[in-house]
Amino acid sequence: MDAQRKKGILEVCVLAVLKKGPSYGYMIIREMEHCIDISESTLYPILKRLEQNGSLKTYRQEYNGRLRKYYQLTPEGQEKIDRFLGEWEELRQMYHFIEQQNQMTQQIPADPAEEESGL
Amino acid sequence: MKKEEYLKKLKFQLIDLPAEDLSQIEDFYEELIYDGMDQGYTEEEILARFESPEEVAKKIRAEYGGIVVYTAKAKSQEQQKQGYESSAELIHTVKVETENLRIRVRTVEEGPVRVYFKPREGQDLVTFEEKDGVFSFRHQMKSSPLHLNWLNLFLDFNILVLELPMNFSGALWLKTTNGSIKIAGLVDLAKGEVFSNNGKIHIENSQVSELQIKTSNAKIELQNLVGKSLEASAGNGLISVKESRFPEKLSLITQNGAVTGRNLISDQITLQTCNGLVGATIIGNQNDYNINSTTRNGFNNLDNVYDSTRHKSLTARTHNGRIQIEFTM
């Protein structure tokens, strides 16, 4: 898949993981394994970008004697998910069209000159 | 490998990133390790699943869009107090020379001297050196046919950002050909020399004791500056200075363009052009100044005067334009 497109989709995947509630780095990677294997070094910049553009917000909460960083979906982030799903419908239609067209056998158009001379 | 070693290696790979980013990345990885241990894995098992520090650094750097950050290793005054382990040298001079780049200079509250620049493959050549307290960054375009150069210029104007800590009080030397320079927020510069061959120079909200500015073919715009002496010369462009104070010397000279000043304060003022108006408001008492004003072709509102008891001087000259200078006091 195109690298840029993949990056964009991964971002929405991460947001979708947060839909059922705030989560933390380790858990997000484990959750995403259902969909795609993502490395820590790929996740970090995604989380950072999503925070910078307001799609998620972060806070810290005590756990086991340390302050764990949690990531939480924002309304803007939800909008991003909705937009992706909406685009998918359009994409699905186009995919279907391309798939159908691709299955047609080639039809060579008749040559008018040949027809006239009765060949 | 133990986690301390991994984190240390990771930090070392990304040492030139902004300190805040670096500590965030370290925290992120440290948490992953703790969480893994809480799940019952050993340190070794967890670290084995991680990519190598080099791999991680490469991926994270790619996120910065290929922007490379050149950071001074020498400490600034603030950092020395915090006891970093680099050498005790202080950066006292920053030299940045570029070809066809725009330069932006900004200040940060604290931190080392930094240059942010995104080299284009096959086009940009950078040499960076830090020696004897001099931070020296030189950029050149790799040689290519002349017409190709101009096309690239048009399509893709690259920018270089120089970041100085607020307490930087040394000398700054900047030069670019074919690119504008914009500087803001310098708090305590001892000396500034700014040259652009073919690009506008804009400096604002800064304190520079001795400031020298030169451009051959573009305008100079200065605003809200304070220092001891200012010399600005444009070959072919207007010079506009607002709300600025340079008591020892304030000299604005151009060949072809207007020279205008608003609320200037200085004891020795020179406003000169060949082809354009000379207009200014000076905060001061006209009677304190010896005035030498000439224009060949235009109205002049000043009366020339020389009196040895006067210690301030104003020189206003143009060939082809009027002179209109008011003293407000």
Image: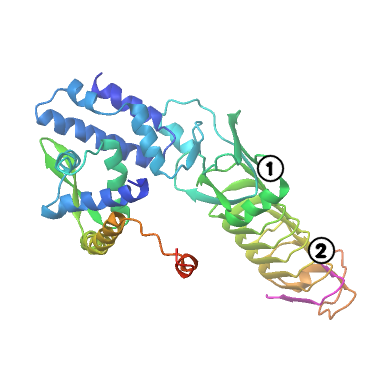
| Amino acid found under the numbered disc labelled 1 | Ser
x and y percentages locating residue A37 in the rendered image: 22, 38
Q: Residues within 10 Å of mark 1 (few under 14, many from 20)?
A: few
- Residue drawn 11% across and 39% down? A63
Q: Which residue is mark 1?
A: B144
| Amino acid found under the numbered disc labelled 2 | Gln
Q: Is residue B320 magenta?
A: yes
Earlier in the chain: of badge 2 and badge 1, it is: 1
* Residue B302, picture quadrant: bottom right
Q: Residue furthest right?
A: B296
x and y percentages locating residue B51 in the rendered image: 29, 28
Q: Is residue A79 magenta?
A: no
Position above or below: B110 against B218: above
* Residue B154, picture quadrant: bottom right
Q: Which residue is mark 2?
A: B255
Position above or below: B54 against A61: above
Is residue A93 toward the left or the right of residue B183 in the image? left
Tell me which segment is drawn in magenta.
B311-329
In the structure shown, which secondary structural element does the residue marked by tag 1 occupy?
Answer: loop
Position above or below: B206 against B296: above
- Residue drawn 68% across and 42% down? B144
Q: Residue furthest top?
A: B1
Q: Marks 2/1: CA distance?
A: 33 Å
x and y percentages locating residue A107 in the rendered image: 36, 59
Q: Quadrant of the N terminus of chain B?
A: top left
Is residue B97 toward the left or the right of residue B296 in the image? left
Chain letter, disc 1 residue = B
Q: Residue furthest front?
A: A118
